[in-house]
Amino acid sequence: MREYYMRRSGFTLIELLVVISIVGVLVALLLPAVQAAREAARRSQCQNNLRQLGLAMQAHHSARGYFPPAFLKPGNWGWSVWLLPYIEEKELYRTLDPTDTTIAVNASTTRPVSVFLCPTDPAPILHVFYSGYARSDYAVSEQVSDGGSKIRVSQIKDGTSKTLMAGERDLKNQAGAIWAGRDTTSGVASVIGRPTWPINTAYAGGNTCCASDTGCTRYAWSSMHSAGATFVFCDASTHFLPETIANDPSQQTCNKPTSANFLLLNLYFRDDGNPVTISEY
């Protein structure tokens, strides 16, 4: 008599474990590549934000003959506010009415504006130090926009392609910034950046601002990108500057920077006359 046997299809336990192990190895190999691709996209968006801000600064200059001030008394509205009409935020600008009002925490100034936010920075939208205003990840150079200033392109004697306009400052490892303007309880670091500390210097004030930050590290430019930060120059070009870029360690204080022949300072000052070549950055 012929016997017939039905063979069961499927995996044995050992085979299943082998498959799971192989899948785990593949995921482990692919995950860094996926994360790197995502960060590349976020970094590209951040770079594009700064490019838009640079073009908006130029549009403001074309319309009014000067770059907007970092903050303008008595209202203390910041440089980013004066750019709103040039970044498709005219309605928000009208809501703020900066020519006739004073900066205050309200529904408008706590509103996130995407062009002021680097997607790599995971910090909260509302600024934890600066009175709860909406966060900005970008701080302007004092050499281009100072308090009440009306700086013109003709004053950038070292060349627009060799002079910093604005750069990143994250709110995870640093003190960030706000787009609305000068936070009257905390000072000008809420809008302004300085090269007194190296790029990516960590904020030294702990969970408060700003008396605990005795060295004024909060003015440093910084980012959540690896090994440097992105800047927009006065010609609206963007460049990623490494955190190792030469700086003057003797100026790591609360004083305003002074001209010295270090690359970061040379890129900061608009008319110091120190030579800068493109290959250096």
Image (cartoon, grey):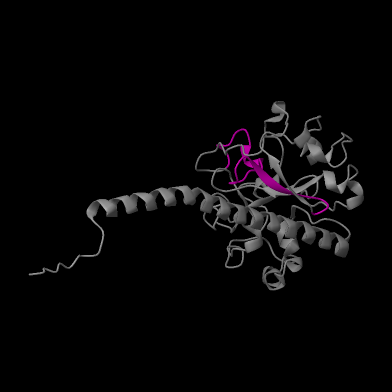
Front-lying residue, 186 or 247: 247
**Vertical relation: 192 (above or below) 217:** below
Tell me the quadrant of the picture where the C terminus can be found: top right
Tell me the quadrant of the picture where the N terminus can be found: bottom left
Front-lying residue, 202 or 96: 202
Q: Is residue 52 left or right of residue 159?
A: left
x, y (%) of residue 202?
58, 38
Q: Is residue 275 left or right of residue 38?
A: right
* Camera sees residue 128: no
**Vertical relation: 224 (above or below) 245:** below
Q: Is residue 275 magenta?
A: no
**Vertical relation: 250 (above or below) 80:** above
Front-lying residue, 129 or 3: 3
The part of the image, by quadrant, that contains residue 268 is top right
x, y (%) of residue 17?
28, 51
Write the residue at 67% across / 33% down. 244
The part of the image, by quadrant, that contains residue 93 is bottom right
- Residue at the extreme left: 1
Magenta highlight range: 210-236
Write the residue at 47% across / 48% down. 29
- Residue at the extreme top: 250
- Looking at the rendered structure, the number of numbered marks drawn on it comes to 0
* Camera sees residue 195: yes
